[in-house]
Amino acid sequence: MVRTVLIANRGEIALRVLRTCRELGLRTVAVYSTDDRDSAVVRQADAAVHIGPGPAARSYLNIPAVIEAARLAKADAVHPGYGFLSENPDFAEVCESEGLTFVGPPAHVMEKLGDKAVARDLMVSAGLPLLPGSRTSLDRAEEARAFADSIGYPVIIKAAAGGGGRGMRVVSHAEEFLRAYTETRAGAQAVFGDGRVYVERYLPSARHVEIQVLLDRYGNGVHMGARDCSVQRRHQKLVEETPAPALPADLLAEMGQAALRGVASVGYVGAGTVEFLVDPGRAYYFMEVNCRLQVEHPVTELVTGVDLVAEQLAIAAGEKLGITQDSLAMRGAALECRINAEDPERDFAPTPGLIEECHLPAGPFVRVDSHVFAGYRVPARYDSLLAKLVVWAPDREGALRRMRAALAEVRLAGPGLATTVPFLRRVLDDRRFQTATHDASLVAQLMADQ
């Protein structure tokens, strides 16, 4: 039985997890770096433990420090949020060895799916369609170049240990390949501590569509609809919505079944997301599995009425899944915009600094997940996400109207602070987005139109 949850994260996701724990009557423990000592989650948690200085490697990624914090605070469970240690199988294994309930999939499953090349093989065995690509990592430059030549350009080079849109490069011409390969390997080694990469065909006009899944340890599982995450800059998402617009219901149901079949085949337990690419002909291809809660999970919560964090905690505590596929009802449409401290006029460069004015929207069917306030200093060391603005309406057209109105209420100002709000308005006003004829190249097209 879980009584005290240590939240091994920061920012809005730490607050998000804390709020569900509070509703469930669970005691919460925050961890914080020196940079985050005045954060909202530290103020609201039942206990808070300092785990190190600002650099993430010495605090939020420091496994011994997090485990010691759990021991000191007498926690019996650890929720990793997303990012940082959330998909680190070593961390999950250490939690288990220390008698802590890790709120996520088993370490051995995470290890398999965290290696993108291994995950591709596993999903092929489960019958999921894949783009042409290498079945193993390609560790020699000439071998990788020859493989890319054989499947045809454009290709994308991906870090085997990558995630969150990082560790990948698109190569359009053969003469660009060797340099991109070298840079991707070096970057993967620096960021993930693992320089292995693989290569697959790149679809320049694809939609990015993902399926939320929930599975318990007793063989029960559900897929919870499709999210479209095609509005991205540098392979990192800016706008997400559900249901995925302009795609047939039977196709989305087929993708949901494939996603559930794929993760069930490897013994997955907990909340996860299976990501796909959908080409203009509506063929779909497996990309990867995210073994954690996604940033965009609120849109699924709004259309299903299911608290995904509560489900994670119940599954981790050994309870059976209380939802069946037949009982799951999805109503209306939900849209999420990520408000980041970034300047779209400077290629989305981060803009850390003091927030002097902070007004975030409210109103019917408007949800804001945020950790910022007037007087909050946006740190330079961490992710630039300030708030997730999420709306629900009976249909997509109504959700677009509600989101425009909500974005108009946002006031975030301070010396040197720029946000993605003006660019998000451009996305919502773009005809391609409004008609759901856009794809993952939309942001690049809008930047080129400036």
Image: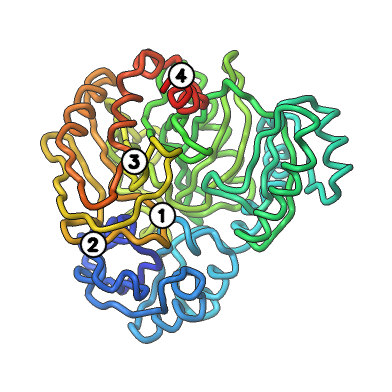
Q: How is the image coloured?
A: rainbow
The residue beneath circle 2 is: 24
The reply to whether callout 1 and callout 4 are in contact (CB within 8 Å) is no
What quarter of the picture does the N terminus occupy? bottom left
Instruction: Give the residue type that dot 2 points to.
Output: Leu
N-terminal of the pair, mark 4 or mark 3, is 3
Mark 3 neighbour class, 10 Å CA radius: few under 14, some 14 to 19, many 20 or more: many
The residue beneath circle 4 is: 438
N-terminal of the pair, mark 1 or mark 3, is 3
N-terminal of the pair, mark 2 or mark 4, is 2
Residue nearest the viewer, comparing 246 with 267: 246
Element carrying mark 1: loop
- Give me the disc on residue 383: 1
Instruction: Give the residue type that dot 3 points to.
Output: Arg
Q: From the viewer's perspective, is the residue at label 2 or at label 1 nearer?
A: 1
N-terminal of the pair, mark 1 or mark 4, is 1
Image check: 193 left or right of 144? Answer: left
Element carrying mark 2: loop
Image check: 87 left or right of 151? Answer: left
The reply to whether callout 4 and callout 3 are in contact (CB within 8 Å) is no
Q: How far apart are labels 1 and 4 at the CA level?
A: 27 Å
Percent from the top left, x then y, of residue 442?
A: 47, 24
Q: How far apart are labels 4 and 3 at the CA level?
A: 18 Å
Percent from the top left, x then y, of residue 18?
A: 27, 62
Instruction: Give the residue type that dot 4 points to.
Output: His
Percent from the top left, x then y, of residue 312?
A: 39, 56
Residue nearest the viewer, comparing 53 with 114: 53
The residue positioned 88% from the left and 35% from the top of the image is 146
Q: How far apart are labels 2 and 3 at the CA level?
A: 27 Å
